[in-house]
Image: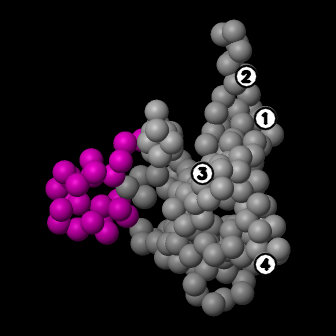
Amino acid sequence: MQHANYYKYIRELYTGPSTEIWKFSTIERTCPILDKQMRRMKMKSILPIADFDLAKKVKEIGFHEPVFAKYQNGILCDDGCSAFEDYNGLKKPDVISAPSLQEIQVWLSKMKRMDVLVYRDIFFGEVGSYYAVIIRRKDGLTRESKRVVSSNLALKAGIRTAVTLLCKKGKRK
């Protein structure tokens, strides 16, 4: 398998089929923003939110995406509205966006070219623990996170490792 196709194959395995499927939706053709908000509202209740420290670090490396929830003075707040907004762009020091782990994962892949992939150990039919593999597409650097008991904890550990790599990179410049 060719190198470029391998990454595309892995990404599609992990994130699902490409977004071309959504173009056949009636709502998508009439109002793409509404469709995106509806999909996010469905996911809102099931996606794990990043903790305050991780949200702060992600803001430092440039996360400015619209989200549903925010941290105000270190406390998670949900306005209860269906619209989402970029709280990091408000220029308020006590308000920070509270993104889900999957939103950070997608943002790292698109904007920082770092893939965070979650795997599970299987050894002779025995199911083991979860871990994340971080791949920096710029130079092929790979790191593994610690082994944990759930996929969400593995994703969180992988994102922390990726953010730490990006913070170290920023300090060296």
Identify which amino acid the numbered label 4 is placed on.
Answer: Lys
Q: Is residue 20 left or right of residue 79?
A: left
Tell me the residue that label 3 is attached to: 115
- As drawn, the label of residue 72 is none
Q: What residue appears at the point 37 percent right and 55 percent down from the top-left corner?
A: 39
Name which of mark 1 and mark 3 comes first in the sequence.
3
Quarter of the view holding residue 96: bottom right
Identify which amino acid the numbered label 1 is placed on.
Answer: Arg
Quarter of the view holding residue 50: bottom right
Q: Quadrant of the C terminus?
A: bottom right
**Cα–Cα gap, marks 4 and 3:** 22 Å
Q: Residues within 10 Å of mark 4 (few under 14, many from 20)?
A: few
Determine whether the residue tagged by mark 4 lies in a helix, strand or loop.
loop
**Cα–Cα gap, marks 2 and 4:** 40 Å
Q: What residue appears at the point 53 percent right and 77 percent down from the top-left corner?
A: 86
Determine whether the residue tagged by mark 1 lies in a helix, strand or loop.
loop
Tell me the residue that label 4 is attached to: 173
**Cα–Cα gap, marks 4 and 1:** 32 Å
Tell me the residue that label 2 is attached to: 128
Give above or below for 166 relative to 2. below
- Indicate yes or no whether the magenta region holds residue 153: no
Tell me the residue that label 1 is attached to: 147
**Front residue of this view, candidates 47 and 54:** 54
Q: Residues within 10 Å of mark 3 (few under 14, many from 20)?
A: many
Determine whether the residue tagged by mark 3 lies in a helix, strand or loop.
strand
Identify which amino acid the numbered label 2 is placed on.
Answer: Gly
Name which of mark 2 and mark 3 comes first in the sequence.
3
